[in-house]
Image (cartoon, rainbow, N blue to C red):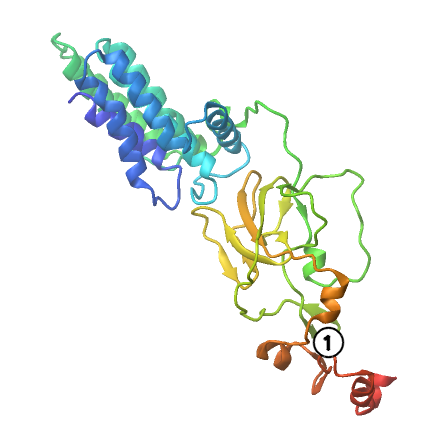
Amino acid sequence: MATVVPAAVIAAAWFRLEEPRDEGWRVLAMVVLAVVPAFVRPRVAAGLVSLCLGLRVALGTWNPHRAGSRFVDGFLDFYDVRVPFDPRTHAEMRGVVLVAILGFVLALVLALRRPAAAIVVVLVGAGWPATLAGGAAGIGLAILLAALVLLAVTTSRRVPRAALPAVAAVALAALVASSSSAVARGGLVDWQRWDFYNAPDKPVSVAYVWNAQYGGISFPRKRTTVLEVKAPRTSLFWRAAVLDFFADDRWIEGGLPDVPAPRGKLLRQEVTVKALSDTRLVGASVPVRFDAGDAPLVRGPGVARLPSGLSRGFRYTVWSYAPQPKPQELAASRPRYPATVAREFLDVWPGVAMPAFGAGQRAVIARLDARPEIAR
C-alpha cells in the first residue's frame, strides 16, 4: 500500500491540467492498471501487460503508428494550448495526460525497492505538471507528504531527530514558494518555453465573410493551409454557414429550415484544423451530420460550431448529401418547396416575395411592377 498516496498525488497533479474534469474514470483506470504489478509476479511482465492495456485506453487504438502519432500531436499541443485545457476538444492532450499518469505510477511501482529512485519519480511525476498549471499552494506540500510516506514505508532505518525540523522547514519553504507571485509568473527554470519543433502557422481569420465587409480583401503573401480534408475526389462546394437574410446593406446568418434528412448515400469527410481562426465547422455542401467526439458542438440544421474556437489539430468528421444530378434530371424535377422555404426564404424585399420556380416570367415581372422602387 506504499503506492496509494504517491500515486494519488501524481494523478491529481496531472488531472489538474484539464477543465472540465469529466473523465475521472479514465484517470482511475490508469492508476489501477499501473498499481496491479505491485501485487503480481513477475512484476516486470505484469508491468508490460498493464502498459499495453493502459496505452490502448489512453490513446484509443491498438495500432502502434497511430498511437504514436496521437501521443506526439498531443505532446506538441501543450506548446500551443493554454492549460487547463478542455479535454473534449483536445483529445490528444487528454491522451498524453493519461499516458503520463500511467507511466509515472508504473515507474513508481517498479522502483519501490529503491526508496531514493521512487522519491525521484514522485518529484518529477508530480512536479512536472505542477509547473505547468501553477496556482496551487498545496501541491508542494502534497508532493512532500508523498515522499515522506514512501520514505516511512519502504525503509526500516530509524529516522534521526534532526529530520523533523528539516521536514518542517522544507514544508514551510514549499508553501511560501508556491504562494509567491514572483515564482508563479515566470518559474525558476521556465522550461515551458522550450520548443521541440517549428512553430505552426498563425491561424487565419475569415471574419470578413461573416461581417459582410465590402471594402476589399487583402490576401497575405504567404499561403497558409487552414484545413486538411480527407474525402473522395469530387468537385464540391464547401460551406461553414449560410447567409440567408438581407438586412439594410448586408447579408447575415439566419436560421436554416429544419428539413428531413435526405435519402441516399452520404459523402464522408475527415477534417483536421491546421490554422483556421473561427468557430464554424466547414463541410461539403450540404452537411447533414457532424461528429467531433466529446467536443461540445452547437449544432443546427446543416451547420455546427465550437464556441471555444477551432484550434490546431482539432479533428471532426462530416457527412454531407452531395448529389450530382444530370441536366435532364434537373429539368424533370418538380418545383416543390417545403412550407418553411416558401414562406420565409423567397423574400427579396419586405412584403415582396419571388414566385416559386416554375411560376413563369410574367409572374416575376408583375411582382416587380408592384414595387416601382425595386424596378428602378
The correct choice, above or below, for 47 with respect to 82 in the image is: above
Q: Residue at x 45, y 39 (%)?
A: 91
Instruction: Describe residue 52's horizontal placement relative to residue 32 as left or right.
Output: right
Q: In x, y percent, where is residue 323? A: 65, 57
| Observer able to see residue 168 | no
Report which quarter residue 103 is drawn in. top left
Quarter of the N terminus within the rendering? top left
Identify residue for label 1: 248
Residue extending farthest right: 376
Secondary structure category for the residue under label 1: loop
| Observer able to see residue 351 | yes
**Crowding at label 1, few (<14), some or many (≥20) Cα neighbours within 10 Å?**
few
The correct choice, above or below, for 21 with respect to 45 in the image is: below
Q: In x, y percent, where is residue 316? A: 53, 45
Residue type, numbered disc 1: Asp
Q: Residue at x 27, y 29 (%)?
A: 31
Instruction: Describe residue 257's horizontal placement relative to residue 140 as left or right.
Output: right
How many labels, in total?
Answer: 1
Instruction: Describe residue 37's horizontal placement relative to residue 202 as left or right.
Output: left
Towards the viewer: 169 or 113:
113
Q: In x, y percent, where is residue 208? A: 72, 57
Q: In x, y percent, where is residue 313? A: 56, 38
Towards the viewer: 203 or 56:
56
